[in-house]
Structure formats: structure tokens, C-alpha cells
Image (spheres, rainbow, N blue to C red):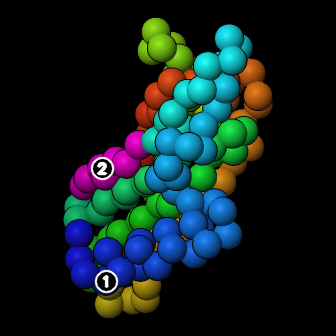
Amino acid sequence: MTVRTTMMRAALLTVLAAVGLGVGAPAAVAATSATGATLAAPSLSQRDNLGSKRWMSTDATLSGVTLYAVTTTHAGERLRGYHGCVTVLFKNSAGAVLGQTSVQRYGVDGSAVGNNHRVVAWNNPVSASIAVNTTSLAIQHWRC
């Protein structure tokens, strides 16, 4: 990760935390199971190489009935950009998929053409029945 990427991600996370939407929120921000037990907020960070010097990374946390995420899209070629998509899957303790976020689509340019690096904070509402039964997350990135 470049210094620029690290600084941009840190700045976004600081802003999100300041308004109470922190990605990577502490375990104190937690869901309650059907039995009343407090569950730590599921979170995940993942980076995927999409080929031809293209990659995406996402940091995601489920807090209550909202998924908060920061996605970085990067193109390393000088003249070719691309569009990348991301979705986050909600899984239960058995590993079964309970649902997923809407697909987020982000485009970047080649480095000689324009902005080849994009960092976006986004969120997605989650139904209460899915949120309370989610114990882990899975992230899917692809070129779209």
C-alpha cells in the first residue's frame, strides 16, 4: 500500500469515526442475538488483485443494521482504467450466506489519463433478521 493510499484511508476512517460511522468500530458497537447475548461486530478487510496492475480493497464492518465500508479502486497502467465492483456477503455461524449488499461500482482512469486511484466510503442497510444472525462477512471484488 502506498503512503498516499494509507494517508487517504486513515483520513476517511478518522472522518467516519468522528461522525460515529467508524469502519472497524470497537467491539462495544455490537449486535444482540435472539437470546440476548452481545455479539462483536463482524468486520473484514480484503484486497484482491484483478489482473493487469488493477486491484481493489475493502474494509467493512457490520454495526447494528448498517454495513459501513471503505473501498479503494486502483489502476496501475498508464493508459487503461477499468470499472470494479464490490459486494459484501453476510454469513451465519454455519457459513451459509444470509444475504448481501447491493453491488457498488467504481471506475478509475489510467495513471496518465486522470485519477487512477479512488477511495470511497459507503454504507448499506441490512435487515434486522440478517444482521442479528450474521457472524462473519465475505467480500467479493471483480472487474465489471
Vertical comparison of 114 with 80: above or below? below
Q: Quadrant of residue 7?
A: bottom left
| Cα–Cα span, label 1 and label 2 | 19 Å
Residue 5: quarter of image: bottom left
Q: Quadrant of the N terminus?
A: bottom left
- Element at label 1: helix
SS for dot 2? strand
Which residue is at 67% across, 26% downward? 32
Q: Is residue 24 magenta?
A: no
Q: Residue at x 74, y 21 (%)?
A: 129
Q: How far from the left and from the top, in percent, is residue 16?
A: 59, 68
User: Between residues 129 and 25, which one lies in front from this camera angle?
Assistant: 25
Q: Position of residue 19 (x, y in %)?
A: 67, 69
Which residues, given as a range, are shown in magenta? Answer: 44-51
Identity of the residue drawn at 51% across and 74% down: 14
Mark 2 or mark 1, which is nearer the start of the sequence?
Answer: 1
Q: Is residue 125 above or below residue 110?
A: above
Residue under label 2, please give it. 48
Task: Provide the residue designation for mark 1.
Answer: 4
Q: Is residue 142 visible from the viewing direction of this image?
A: no
Residue 139: x and y, percent?
Answer: 44, 40
